[in-house]
Image: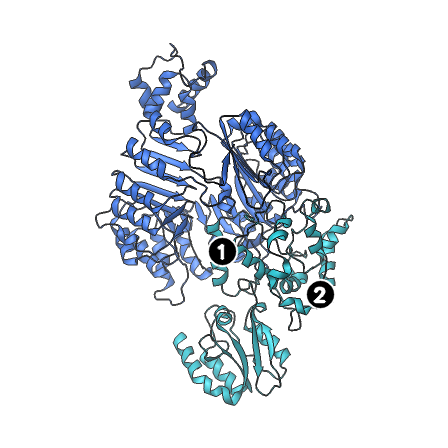
Chain colours: A cyan, B blue
Amino acid sequence: MSVPLEHDYIGLSDASSLERSSESSNISSDNVTNNVFNLKATELSLGLPGFGKISEENATKFGPVIKNYMSGAKRGFSDVNFNGSEKWGLKGGSEADLCKGIDGVFEKNQTQQLISSSDVKPVEVEKKGPVSENGSVPPSAKAQVVGWPPIRSFRKNTMATNLSKNHTDVAEGSLGAGGCLYVKVSMDGAPYLRKIDLKIYHNYAELSKALEKMFSCFTIGQCTSNGIKGQGLTESKLKNLLHGSECVLTYEDKDGDWMLVGDVPWKMFIDSCKRLRIMKGSEAIGLAPRSMEKCKNRN
Amino acid sequence: MDLDQKRTRTVDRVVDSVDRDVESPESTPMCPFPDEVLEPVLSLINSHKDRSSVSLVCKDWYNAERWSRRHVFIGNCYSVSPEIVAGRFPKIRSVTLKGKPRFSDFNLVPEDWGADVYPWLIVLAKAYPFLEELRLKRMAVSDGSLEFLATNFPEFKALSLLSCDGFSTDGLKAIATYCRNLTELDIQENGIDDLGGDWLSCFPESLTSLQVLNFASLNSEVSFNALEKLVTRCKSLRVLKVNRNINLDQLQKLLLQAPQLTELGTGTFTQDLVTRPVADLETSFGNCKNLQTISGLWDTNSLYLSVIYPACASLTFLNLSCATLRSFELTMLLMHCKSLRRLWVLDTVGDRGLEAIGLWCPLLEELRVFPADPFEQEEVAGVTESGLVSVSRGCPKLHYVLYFCHQMTNAAVATVVQNCPGFTHFRLCIMNLGQPDYLTNEPMDEAFGAVVRSCPNLQRLAVSGLLTDLTFEYIGKYAKNLEILSVAFAGSSDLGLKYVLGGCPRLRKLEIRDCPFGNAALLSGLTKFESMRSLWMSACNLTMNGCRVLAKEMPRLNVEVMKDEDSEDSQAHKVYIYRTVAGPRRDAPPFVLTL
């Protein structure tokens, strides 16, 4: 079960998590001759998707590019939202360097995947470091080599649809199909807005917790789906919420309507959410009857 | 000893002593059987390998064999011309044709490379107007070809298209409309232009002969009304695989009409709005007493998965590769599947799920574990070496494995093949390129060494991970029955390929990508290539000169180089070499050079 680390809204976690993950992976590999490369492999570097644990003698075979990208340099904030393709040098020559003899032309969808995965990777890798099952560091993001892994296109496409259709599953920690989704969060009465990446949360509980930290007077506790597919707020829960709390979390969906957070399954929510707004209770009551009706229709 | 065995033994004895010249074999008093006896006897032989052997015995047998052959299998469509086939075999009813090299599945072969079925169809229409079956794999098939097929073969019955491309659902319309005796329409995993589902509505009301219908990989919605009527009137239907658009309610209606099914591919296996209780679905599955195979099961979860439990006891093949199940869901399901022989799953089931396989499926012979997220958009744990070991412990009959994982150890593989020495197909894909044993940090040489040493029946091997020439030394030395070898990102020098070409007496297909093998290695296998179907080498160290030397020495091979804009002129970026009696291709596109 993955537990989201505390992190600031940029999504970079603090140095201590890096240390923790290094330790846990050192313990798992009991080999006394833990060579330099092994340690390097456990570093959670934010470099270009490399080839995982390639031994040093083979690093030359796969080109000097890999060594560069496997160094443990952390990216600064200015790099996080950067257009992925320029930063990672996806075009032309460096592609060819990545692996001797790769076709110069990537499939369009693969390039897109690479861009999106490189955006998402830093956050995910750090989050999972200390909590992965067998204590070893998950493999670093892979270079998108043409035709690797050898999966037929049919299966690739089926899986891509599966990933985006999958409902949230906290146990497996699956997220949406790559990319990030920054939305503005406003709170009535607050002097400035915040921005959060919806893709890094798995369900309403996590979102609620994160927002709670950001806006400490926020009480969205009850406004969660209980993780079971297809069940949002029940009518009674919604009533409790409105009578019990001061603030209500709402969102603007694709149609421009303001909706109560928690009605729809998580996946549907992040697909349609454009921005978030924490409303004061008095304003939110106007929202309630429609939400209640929706609940009625659902149950 | 039955007739088959007796016959084969005779052939074995005679073949050794008779001149192998097929053009004019001597007729000897060793073959006293008249044709009237020989032909019906030989017609009982179905294996094309056996038939090849039979045809080499003597002229009489050659003739008897060619007149009695009903099914011809052509593993490489460019190894022979349709005219030669038609000339030799006068009475063919069924043709199987394979086209592009296998790496075209992974986008390594440019479009328009070839393997067009149309030139074949023209010849087949003249030579075999009563052709009944056509099975194509990795061929280029146009709508025009499908229309031609549908309208020129009045007895046509069975069409199977696997991994083909170039056609659209319009082509399927033609097949549905004109093939009055259709028994089989099997459309799998093709690069098809899906223009809509109305092709299914083109089956006439008079068509009742359908036995196999597989449109699982098509995306468009078909008319359920038309489908239901079709299923209802085709009483011999035994294989039905629908696509994802068919929902559970609809599936239930279909099952009601076709309880005799032996293979079922479901559509989406969940629903938000329950219109009838789950118990009804369970009953429907319970009524299907002959089910041996279930596939599809898109989007399913524990609740809905339980409806198939009544059908599970007799299942021999369960294809869960479209269902993102987790370990406990799989475990609960497998408890009911004691007779399972083949299982395909996604790695979302994890090592825990694989343990359940070892526990509940002692008769398992084949396991395929696919990655749910091969490009790691998300951090999925997948499966590790311990999952595979658990399966091997519980399933001693396991002989076919296809395993995608992120990590592996030499020790684990050694344990697996120790538990299951009967492997015939061992395909291990460690998805991280050049990944060593993650515990010892050594190359994975010893793993594959153990495989080839422990498994004398090994026919097919795919290697991965960090590998030196030692792996290939082992393979060349021990893999006496190996027929198909796939290599990617492995080896240290020419020696690797030399070992393989110098050993492996039964090697038929060799496909290599991104390995440091050069001209010397290629040329070390000069005489071997004629005993092989094909060799693919891409992104290795071959040059045009090396390939030219090979082409010169071996005129009965086609040495084809695919030119790439990015690579230098002297480099041979993609090389495809195959034996042929048809000479150089006449339909080669400009980027394919035959040397």
Q: Is residue A212 visible?
A: yes
**x 42%, y 78%: residue:** A295
Residue B245 sits in quarter? bottom left
For residue B63, above or below residue B438: above
**Dot 2 lies on which element?**
helix
Q: Quadrant of the C terminus of chain A?
A: bottom left
Q: Is residue B364 visible?
A: no
Q: Which residue is mark 1?
A: A159
Are labels 1 and 2 on one chain? yes
Amino acid, disc 2: Ser
Q: Earlier in the sequence, mark 1 or mark 2?
A: 2
Amino acid, disc 1: Met
Q: Which residue is mark 2?
A: A17
Residue B297 sits in quarter? bottom left
Q: Residues within 10 Å of mark 2 (few under 14, many from 20)?
A: some
B194 vs A162, nearest the viewer: B194
x, y percent for residue B486 = 56, 39
For residue A190, above or below residue B265: below
A63 vs B91, nearest the viewer: A63
Q: Residues within 10 Å of mark 1 (few under 14, many from 20)?
A: many
x, y percent for residue B255 = 32, 54
